[in-house]
Image: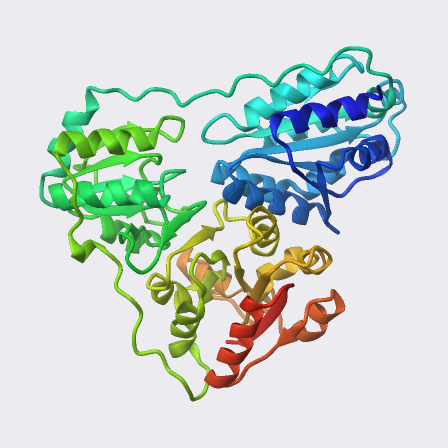
Amino acid sequence: MNASDALIKTLVNNGLEVIFANPGTSEMHLVASIDNNPEIRPVLGLFEGVVTGAADGYARMAEKSAANLLHLGPGLGNGFANIHNAKKARSPLINIVGDHATYHLKHNAPLTSDLDNLAKSASDWVGRSNTTEDICDLANLAWQQANSLPGQISTLIIPADCAWGEFKGNIPKPLQKKEFDPIDEKLISNSIEILKKDNSILYVGGKFLNEKCVTLAAKIATKTGCRLVTDTFVSRIRRGEGLPIIEQVPYFAESAADFLKDSSGIVFIGSRPPVSFFAYPDKKSYLTPPETKIVNLCSAEQDGLYALNSLADEAGANKINKNLLQTPISDVPESGNLDASNLGLLIANLMPENSIVSDEAATSSFLVTPQALKAKPHDWLCLTGGSIGQGLPLAVGAAIAKPDRPVIALHGDGGAMYTVQALWTQARENLNITNIIFANHSYEILKIELSRVGAVKTGQRADSMFSLDNPKLDWIKLSQSMGVPCYEPKTVEDFIKNFSSCVREDGPSTILIQI
């Protein structure tokens, strides 16, 4: 058997269903093996950042790993930003990276690079095949490590001769899945004591924001009187009408510090004390007040569901105060001009139940997120690692993982240009994704940050580095050129018509909103 076939069969036995790919010459035998194994769905991305971002979106919704097929060090490097975002999201990911044949590396061909160290900088586990006979064992390890809870990044490096050679062994059985680390049971009663104090917080994050977990958290809050809080940017959260309300720490450091001030104690499950996104002159990086009692009950590597169940049992929590449940949306306009005051209400009201939202709207998110909290129950995916250009690819992976659910991508125009090629993949795969592009023709967040970091007075040359209006991006032509129809509604009536048809019909679409 060809070693490439053995590799793919090993991953299929583990549960692999999708490979997001941007291959090159070194990966041709792997491409052929994908063709030989119909259990695998190959998805082409025109840029490696689309590939790695899509694998992240798939992993968040499928709750298991996809694989990326990348070409040598430059291919891995091109995909690095969204691997970084996936790592911060704790998404299970396997990067399969082709390399030069083992005997060819010494010649330092043009595409030769320090691939191993590049892989280590982006991965939790790195394996390199040295012969055709180790390739399946490494594949099993890559899957086990990637899918170890809560999720990790595995990178498997396959030299070309290890891929094209003959595999003479037997396909090994998958390795046993690693379980969560146990929590310290002694901290349960201590946590309840803290949560019963005035101005206490139950801070839940990581993989523990699904409906079961947030429901348990709300029961605990009802019994103890604590606040429910989560991180500013989360990998996936279940929320909407009738579901528990969980406050998110504000983005700006001074707002976050004010949000957390006077906290008597905080119990952390699946997360850790928040810090400011960046350092600022004369502002604190660590946002929790120094006098606040901190209990790290459960790390991301431990079982947050068990911890929440244990807290609920200890407290005798079995019901939810109605004040902790999200109320439905109201006062939605039916006519008039489309503007910042009504856009969020319209999106929230029109979102179908069980929508999946990929949010990289940046500053425009302030227009949508507060109202979207009241939409019908849905899953919300955030830009976890701060490296922009994730939203469109993330939507690709989410749509492939959950083809029966509409996906909505909210994206700023500047960030969307990083991975605009994702639109082509959306069209090629006929994915039900509605892309809403907020066009303010600038990197607006950087304008805000320029003043916040205390930079000296600036002029037109500095301003030009944040401007996208010379020339202005033509999103209608950009989207249409990649096979995705684009609409630019000006009125409430037009938006209702466009959005309603886009989320209902097969295939992707783009709605351009001028901000």
Instruction: Identify the residue at horizontal 84%, vertical 19% (top origin).
Output: 1
Q: In the image, is residue 480 above or below residue 176?
A: below
Colouring scheme applied when the structure was drawn: rainbow
Q: Position of residue 392 (x, y in %)?
A: 60, 56
Image-quadrant location for residue 374: bottom left
- Toward the viewer: 422 or 465? 422
Q: In the image, is residue 263 above or below residue 296?
A: below
Image-quadrant location for residue 375: bottom left
- Toward the viewer: 103 or 127? 127
Q: Is residue 323 left or right of residue 240?
A: left
Number of labels in the image equals 0
Q: Position of residue 245 (x, y in %)?
A: 27, 54
Residue 280 appears anywhere in the view: no
Instruction: Identify the residue at horizontal 74%, vertical 64% (top origin).
Output: 482
Q: Is residue 491 left or right of residue 454?
A: right
Q: In the image, is residue 215 above or below residue 455?
A: above
Q: Position of residue 64 (x, y in %)?
A: 54, 35
Q: In the image, is residue 52 above or below residue 395?
A: above
Instruction: Identify the residue at horizontal 64%, vertical 33% (top origin).
Output: 16
Q: Position of residue 140 (x, y in %)?
A: 63, 20
Instruction: Identify the residue at horizontal 57%, vertical 50% (top origin).
Output: 394
